[in-house]
Image (cartoon, coloured by chain):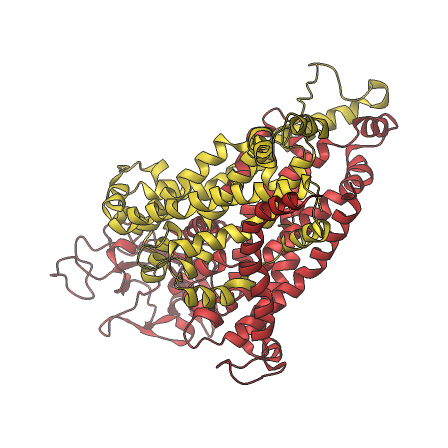
Amino acid sequence: MTGTRRVVAAVFLLPALVLLGALVLYPIGYSVYRSFFDQAGTGFAGFDNYEALFTDDTILTAVKNNAIWVVFAPTVATALGLIFAVLTERIRWGTAFKLIVFMPMAISMLAAGIIFRLVYDQAPERGVANAVAVSVHDTFNESAGFPKARPLPVHPLEKAAGGTFVSKEPIRAGEPLRVPLVGVAPAKMPGDARPATVTPTPPGDRISGTAWLDFTRGGGGKPNVVDPEELGLKGLKVEAVKDGEVIATATAGADGVFTLPASADGAQLRLPADNFREPYNGVDWLGPSLVTPGIIGSYVWMWAGFAMVLIAAGLAGLPRELLEAARVDGANEWQVFRRITVPMLAPVLAVVLVTLMINVLKVFDLVFIIAPGSSQDDANVLALQLYRSSFGTDADLGIGSAIAVLLLLLVIPVMLVNIRRIRKEGRR
Amino acid sequence: MSSAPDVNTARIGRRKAVTRQPGVPEAPKAAQSLGARIAARAGGGVMRVFLVLVALFWLMPTIGLLLSSLRDPQDIAATGWWKIFTAPSELTFENYQRLLDNSTITGSLGSTIMITVPSTVLVVVIGSFAGYAFAWMEFPGRDWLFLLVVGLLVVPVQVALIPVSELFGAIGIFETTLGVVLFHTAFGLPFAIFLLRNFFAEIPRELLEAARLDGAGEIRLFTRVVMPLGGPAIASLGIFQFLWVWNDMLVALIFADSESPPITVALQQQVRQFGNNIDVLAPGAFVSMVIPLAVFFAFQRQFVSGVMAGAVK
């Protein structure tokens, strides 16, 4: 070992060591030091800042959310990655599939955030998640028709309990019932509603009526009269009620006409509240309770491909003879998967899980972009809180540094495992 | 956790295409009853359908954004992108036109390039030097220094945000492109050194000894022998670092000049100011994705091997 050799080595290493020392190592020391001082940075605070991590509500939410993240995001992404890797193994277009699922890895978390803001858009007509939710919901429950409809004071109806409307007069056989309402925007009317008609009561036994929107566009209609062009309230439900019991129900057709049996004579006409319920508007994906699972979903979309590619590489390395031998011995695919594939992949699965856990600890962009301002506190995570504590209004660098140290402490076990492994390998 | 994989063979597809002869069943027939065979066939069909659905599900968010970026702002406000399929309205490049007329956005693309390219080059160059030193030079403390670098692999950038912003403030490079580049370089180095040192260590000793006997000095050896041989690993590292820096938002948010931020920060400001103006955000997000996706598709293999080596970063 000559002197020049040492000088050359020093020259080769110097730039790297200077940068690592100044921007990685020194900050670690400084963060630890700063975390023991108060907001101003002058008074010694002991462990106060660390205590604040577990007592301050906002930060505690971040700690809890991060725990949820660390438990769920890596496991879901790894499970999906495993499933995809195993299933695509024997499919000709497996590579194309892998490309599609892996692609989100290449884009920024910011772009993914914008993509999922659109997916989770609250309005069912814009956000695909709610469009699906609403169509599924409406398949099982009829959507309500006329949320803001109401009678005018001159109308023969009045407001009753529970959002219903009832007739002021009892039903009388022999004259057509009139059910006029206002307050439905023309755009919200059923597309196939037709101008309302009044059918004279059929002789004998039945009572007919008309439910219509008592409003002529451009004005000129008379209240309580079925003017031409006024549309029938298609789908409006009416009930005949006697002594608190519903004895008959009917639904208005496209021209607003409905018929009740003769037994409804003397009963009270009631419009049930179902008619006026707000239509189902989907799920509040980015509201307080669902915002974290929602953002975790976007993370899984980004990172399942990563798990899949690593696991697929592990699968390619498995001894095929072993799997074939098991199949020849009569094991079915599930048994082969459970008893051979998964145990042999355990090291790879562990690497994927740990990598994702470390990655999830630092999740910032997705939460920062997807969570609307109103849910930011509910969706809070450590990295976001660190940003807010360090660079937001009313910054407290003591708290920010304490969060940084906490993040560092959480990755130290992995650091030690890495170092031990390299030491074992690296005795050249 | 995972040692550096063989850079030459890592890719998304299979290492060796395992081609099956058509008509040859997977397992000997004797071991499978007819019922089991039928079940396996049906299962295969279900599996294929499932995978097609998953693929569509995975594509849908991106397609939604793409189609939204090509619609008129009024259409976007009124209906979802899937309406294109039932009532094809005019698709238009107007949003992109407006975006590219917007000097903030075009300037931010320039800033992104000004940050990404130097960061990538610096990490490759400095990392190669250090990687070579760790692989082939003798000096005291070599092993424990390398272990220190390995330890730094998993340090979260969050640890450095406060100290480095104060440090940069003190030396006057806070909120400058230089500061962002130095930060990204420093945090890219542990991985770079780890990857390249392992790769350089694989070079046959005889090759280096022969060159030394021919009178090549360390520097010549490095530039003429080691760097050319290190091509694949250097490509992986470059691609990985390039995407990493291009896609970064947090570091730029803090250390970049807020007057001329990179594209991620510029779009983030849009989100903060206007919330959901998809007519700007959708084309903006797509413009920011074009280069990473092009790099991804062009250099899949290098990217995957970089990702694999970077597991547990």
> Image point 22% across, 73% down: which residue?
A154
In the image shown, does A44 or A67 lie closer to the viewer? A44
Residue A89 visible in the displayed image: yes
Residue extending furthest toward the bottom? A43
A60 on left or right of B284? right
Q: Please, which residue is most extreme toward the front here?
A: A3
x and y percentages locating residue A194 in the rendered image? 26, 49
x and y, in percent, of residue B146 in the image: 68, 50
Q: Quadrant of the C terminus of chain A?
A: top right
Rendered-image quadrant of the N terminus of chain A = top right
Residues B253 and A346: in front is B253
* Mark count: 0
Q: Residue furthest left?
A: A220
Nearer the observer, A322 or B29: A322
**Chain red in the figure, letter:** A
A379 up-or-down from B224: above or below: below
- Which residue is located at x 38 percent, y 41 percent? B66
Residue A161 in picture, x, y percent from top left: 41, 76
Residue B53 appears in the picture as rendered? no
Q: Is residue A18 left or right of residue B107?
A: right
Residue B86, located in which quarter of the rendered image?
A: top left
The residue at 41%/42% (across/down) is: B289
Residue A253 x %, y %: 34, 51
Q: Tell me, by letter, which chain the rendering colours yellow.
A: B
Q: Nearer the viewer, residue B195 or A319?
A: B195
Q: Is residue A292 above or below residue A7?
A: below
